[in-house]
Amino acid sequence: MERKLPNYCEHKASGRAFVYLPLGPGKRKRVYLGDYNSAASLAKYDKVIGEWLTTKQAPRVADTGPTVRDIAERYQSHREPSLTPDKVYDLRNAVKLLIEMFGSRPATEFHALQFERFRTILIDRGYAREYGNRFLRIVKECCKWAMQRQYMTADQFAVVDSISPLTSKEAPTKVVGPVDDADVDAVLPYLSEDFQDTVRFIRATGCRPGEAIRMRVGDVDRESWLLKPASHKTAHKGKARAIPIPSAVHGLLLPRLLRPDDAYVFGAEGGAKPYQKRALGRAIDRVIKRLNVEREEAEQPLINHWHPYQLRHARATEVREEYGVEVAQVILGHARIDMTQHYAKVTEEKAKAVGKLLG
């Protein structure tokens, strides 16, 4: 006999959701969950079911196989070794949320309804479309992995895989604006020396935070003062990337460029290890929160919260206004795919010219 979980039901008269929990032979208890089909009621349903399954009141039946928690944790252990640190971060967060919502549910009972609830939670929590869709892809990949190992059926996966990603209407892309230099200056003295220099470098070059964090000594051409990252966001598309390094930050780089070619310019332990990209953002966030508590007590103006990507936007805004869109395109590393071959040659020449312009 397979276990059948109590159904999520609607009380037509009141519009509320409820579930009947079996308490033994001929006995059951009705538990109200909130407004029918609301995110809160769906979350409460899974919590109530999870608690019920751990009590002696739940019927003892034959084992129904691994739970969603079992599958998610096994999948995480399988995938992590082959992922970059950024993707590991996304994987862990997606798995954490999946377990939070459905961890105690048997994997054979994870269907499209649960995936839709997971999708709804991402919307309700305000996830940006791109970030939310990363979580959905991870869950689908987890389900596919489970199907291939016969923890889930092919029909289960087919239905889950057919559910559409988040749309721009459901989860609008968040607009990121440039950071005010006054807010940057207020935070800098309280960061470590490595992070101070990283912030100054991103602000001066407009590079991506990840490019600065992963930058190695050998990536810097000291004759043309170009950063030519060995790996970058669009490298898999065959695009070139050459970032001009203004003379304003040559001084902070020179001592760091004395390290071996494979050392990280802004890395920990003298460049032996890279920092996680999000470590910089977390450090900035902690400083701002602490300083704002002090400022609020002293009735002083608060520091606006900002993150490393806004440094890139600040530089891009300056360059676009002073030198035009084409130069900003070079700084940001953006180009159409059909221009890949041409761009691979033109990028470096343009970047050198931009470096001279920027000083």
Image (cartoon, helix red, strand yellow):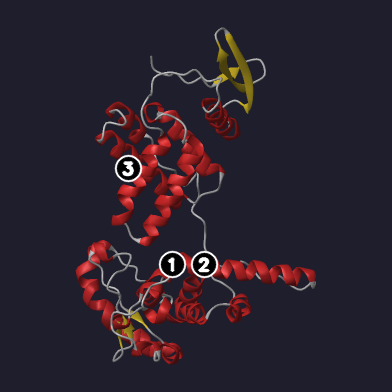
Q: Position of residue 131 (x, y in %)?
A: 44, 52
The image quarter containing residue 245 is bottom left
Residue 247 vs residue 225: left or right? right
Within 10 Å of disc 3 (Cα), the crowding (few <14, some 14-19, many 20+) is some
Quadrant in which the N terminus appears: top left
- Residue type at mark 3 is Glu
Compared to residue 263, the image places residue 14 above or below, namely above
Within 10 Å of disc 1 (Cα), the crowding (few <14, some 14-19, many 20+) is some
- Alpha carbon of mark 3 to alpha carbon of mark 2: how far? 28 Å
Q: Residue at x 40, y 75 (%)?
A: 212
Question: In the rendered image, is residue 329 in sight?
Answer: no
* Mark with earlier residue (3, 2): 3
What is the number of callouts on the image? 3
The image quarter containing residue 254 is bottom left
Compared to residue 88, the image places residue 104 above or below, namely above
- Alpha carbon of mark 2 to alpha carbon of mark 1: how far? 8 Å
Q: Position of residue 171 (x, y in %)?
A: 50, 47
Is residue 197 or residue 183 the one in the foreground?
197
Q: Position of residue 298 (x, y in %)?
A: 79, 73
User: Residue beneath label 2, please?
Assistant: 281
- Residue type at mark 1 is Lys
- Residue type at mark 2 is Gly
- Alpha carbon of mark 1 to alpha carbon of mark 3: how far? 24 Å
Q: Position of residue 185 (x, y in %)?
A: 60, 80
Tags 2 and 1 touching, CB below 8 Å:
yes
Quadrant in which the C terminus appears: bottom left
Q: Residue at x 58, y 66 (%)?
A: 285
User: Residue beneath label 3, please?
Assistant: 141
Is residue 54 or residue 146 the one in the foreground?
54
User: Residue beneath label 1, please?
Assistant: 277
Q: Residue at x 70, y 69 (%)?
A: 292
